[in-house]
């Protein structure tokens, strides 16, 4: 395992060791920060992920988006273009299915696809990062 893989593994272990209270507090902080960000406030179409494998919960931010009439889009594994994603509209009634990686995503419906260049914001999960 290379240094990058080892670091990612260690950070994931630390993330998964956080208490429910710490995780909840971080999710609330995320929603507060994002919901006050000028780019988010101006945005109409926001792409974000559904939390998986101990990632920071995005549920409260997604609910904030819905309450503030923002369109929410989730990534979907492209069915025939390997390594690519589509972004599908996510609403409260959207049916979710498990993809090939075991991650929940909207069931493919071409009428719900948003071209990437029409998204105002794309929020992505990161395991770790540095200042560079």
Image (tube, rainbow, N blue to C red):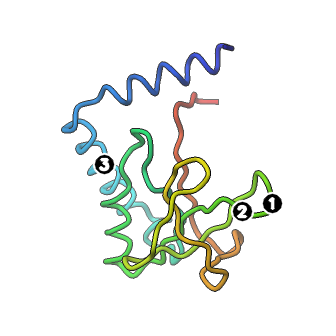
Q: Secondary structure at mark 2?
A: loop
Separation of marks 3 and 1 at Cα, in angstroms: 33 Å
Q: Quadrant of the C terminus?
A: top right
Frontmost residue, 97 versus 93: 97
Callout 2: 10 Å neighbours few (<14), some, many (20+)? few
Residue 86: x and y in percent read 67, 66
- Mark sitting on residue 27: 3
Task: Choose the circle earlier in sequence order: 2 or 3.
Answer: 3
Write the residue at 62% across / 68% down.
87
**Residue 1 image position (x, y, % from top left):** 66, 13
Binning the other alpha carbons within 10 Å of mark 3 as few (below 14), some (14 to 19) or many (20 upward) gives: some
Depth order, front residue of 124/6: 6
> Which residue is found at the position 57% from the left and 28% from the top?
130
Label 1: few (<14), some (14–19) or many (≥20) C-alpha neighbours in 10 Å: few
Q: Is residue 11 above or below residue 96?
A: above
CA–CA distance in space, label 2 to label 1: 6 Å
Determine which residue is flagged by label 1.
Answer: 81
Residue found at the far left of this picture: 21
- Numbered tag placed on residue 78 in the rendering: 2
Are discs 2 and 3 less than 8 Å apart at CB?
no
């Amino acid at each position: 395992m290379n240094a990058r893989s080892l670091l990612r593994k260690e950070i994931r272990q630390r993330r998964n060791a956080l208490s429910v209270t710490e995780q909840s507090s971080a999710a609330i902080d995320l929603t507060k920060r994002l919901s006050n960000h000028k780019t988010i406030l101006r945005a109409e179409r926001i792409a974000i992920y559904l939390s998986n494998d101990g990632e920071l919960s995005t549920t409260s931010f997604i609910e904030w988006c819905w309450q503030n009439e923002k369109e929410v889009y989730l990534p979907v594994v492209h069915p025939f273009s390997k390594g690519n994603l589509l972004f599908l509209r996510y609403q409260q009634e959207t049916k979710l299915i498990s993809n090939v990686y075991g991650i929940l995503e909207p069931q493919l419906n071409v009428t719900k696809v948003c071209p990437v260049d029409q998204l105002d914001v794309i929020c992505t999960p990161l395991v770790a990062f540095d200042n560079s």
